[in-house]
Image (tube, helix red, strand yellow):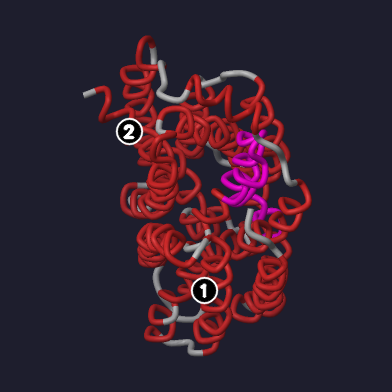
Amino acid sequence: MKGTIRKYGPPIFHCINDFGQGALTALLPFFISHYGLNYYQAATVIFCNTVVASVAQPVLGYAADRWRVPWFIPIGFFVTLVSISAIAVVSSYEMILALSLLAGIGAALFHPEAALLVKRTQSHEIGNAMGRFAVGGSAGFALGPLIASGVYTWGASYLWVFSCIAALGVLVYIYAFTGDAMVTDSSCADVGESSAARNDWTSFGKLFFVIAARSILFSVLSIFIPLLYISVLSGTADMSSLALTLYFALGGILTYVGGWLSDRIGFLNTIRLGYIVFLPALLGFLYIPNIWGFFGFMIPMAFGVFSQYGPITVLGQKYLAKNAGFASGITLGLGITLGGLVSPYVGHLADVYGVQAALQVLMPVGVVGLIMSMWLKAP
């Protein structure tokens, strides 16, 4: 029983942690309607969630390379989800920002050590294991908005369901990953790998631009898909959460597809294909403002964003073979949070020009990602 949980525990914990990230974006229409926020203020909620995480995750990843800190995993997702729940009891915009920031700290604690847990416990099948881990995160982003949509029916007090999920996750972690369960199948291999490995900082520096481009696409779309659904298609707030859930559900499937493609056409070719598919799909998504354009072009657009997730993570660990924890903090951590730093500026454009026009800034971002991916070499 413990062996099975240890195999599937990391993607489950990743799913639990990313409940909070996905739920926060889905709650933006709720904040707008109940607190009278504009698009800039709503996007700033995500900015606070990501700014500390963006600074902290590389540092925490380096710490994970130096020391074993497995307790970062349960503390991380517990802090993330309890912070989301605590929004139920606040009444000011400033407190929402503070709790959003605290949720970002929880995510920063979680990601680097969780990625290393996969490497340490499942080194014999690292490709499949990392693929499952990535799909777990995508599933969390998909389920978060679905669970959060209950707030539109039962009110803000409903958000305490996230704390219950966090507590259950902590109990599972204690059962499966403490005591003798922490003996891994790669404890000896890690020593040999670290002595023989070397870092290719030049290639990782180029990869960072690809990571940043994907992160901006991911974060901005996560924030503005429900807002686009409401403003352009005249949808309701609760249905906008379902639209975001569908997007992230596609992401879970397409993350797995990206891993499958990587084994057949290579990591770099999968990343390049993602950008090539994304750019025309975004044009259709924005300029066919009806239900068919919205959901029809969402599929290839989601492929362009999510298919890169696994390949980027593996490439980062290969380029920085001696500092896999630091690489994971960048690829898994900043790869999600970095884009949130630009979201307030996109929100400001949406206030001035409308959501549809503001999302056009994603076109040059996708072009930069494609160009930089062409410049990369195989590790």
Residue 218, image x, y percentages: 56, 61
Q: Are marks 1 and 2 in contact (CB under 8 Å)?
A: no
- Front residue of this view, candidates 246 and 212: 212
Which residue corresponds to mark 2? 7
Q: Which residues are magenta?
A: 315-343
> Helix, strand or loop at disc 2?
helix
Residue 372 falls left or right of residue 114? right
| Residue projecting furthest to the top | 179
Instruction: Say which mark, if any, is on residue 85.
Output: none
Residue 350 falls left or right of residue 20? right
> Helix, strand or loop at disc 1?
helix
Residue type at numbered disc 2: Lys
User: Is 289 in the magenta?
Assistant: no
Residue 93 in sight from this viewpoint: no
Occupied quadrant, residue 123: top left
Identify the residue at image location x=36%, y=29%.
169
Instruction: Say which mark, if any, is on residue 228.
Output: 1
Identify the residue at image location x=69%, y=56%.
207
Occupied quadrant, residue 182: top left
Between discs 1 and 2, the one toward the N terminus: 2
User: Is 330 in the magenta?
Assistant: yes
Q: Nearer the viewer, mark 1 or mark 2?
A: 2
Residue 214 in sight from this viewpoint: yes
* Neighbourhood count class around disc 1 (C-alpha, 10 Å): few under 14, some 14–19, many 20 upward: many
Residue 318 falls left or right of residue 150? right
Identify the residue at image location x=60%, y=39%.
104
